[in-house]
Image (cartoon, helix red, strand yellow):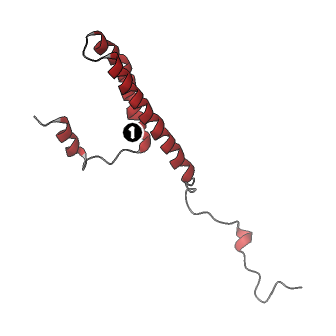
Amino acid sequence: MASIAEQLAATVGRFPPPSLAVVIAELKRERGMRERVYPRLIDNGTLTEEKALFQQRCLEEAIDRLEELLSAERSRTPASPAKGPVRAPAHVNALPPAGDAGVA
């Protein structure tokens, strides 16, 4: 059976790289899972409270840093253009009648 790392490597060509927002959402999902699972792991001795706190702190730091990066990225990205070409009102592009130089 292939390891998780091997299975993950096999997906690289099948899936586009996740956006920063998707990565943050996945880390938040992981945070929620740890909040539910870690107490049981600590109770049964599989994980020490100190290690759990450290891992949660690292995860929180990763989320915070990526959210800052996303915020900075969004502030640098111009707003998406309007759909379709932007046209000036008809009178702006109208040509003066032939022979009229526009001077009185």
Q: Which residue is mark 1?
A: 23
| In this picture, residue 21 sits left or right of residue 49 | right
| In this picture, residue 80 sits left or right of residue 100 | left
- Extreme left residue here? 1
Instruction: Where is residue 58? Give x, y as percent.
Output: 39, 31
- Extreme top residue here? 43
For the residue marked with disc 1, what is the amino acid?
A: Val
Q: Quadrant of the N terminus?
A: top left
| In this picture, residue 53 sits left or right of residue 77 | left
| In this picture, residue 78 sits left or right of residue 44 | right
- Extreme right residue here? 104
Instruction: Where is residue 8? Give x, y as percent.
Output: 22, 41
Instruction: Where is residue 7? Give x, y as percent.
Output: 19, 39
In the picture shown, does residue 55 fall above or below 7?
above
- Extreme front residue here? 50
Residue at (48% x, 44% y) in the render: 69
Element assignment for label 1: helix
Q: Residues within 10 Å of mark 1 (few under 14, many from 20)?
A: some
In the picture shown, does residue 5 fall above or below 47?
below
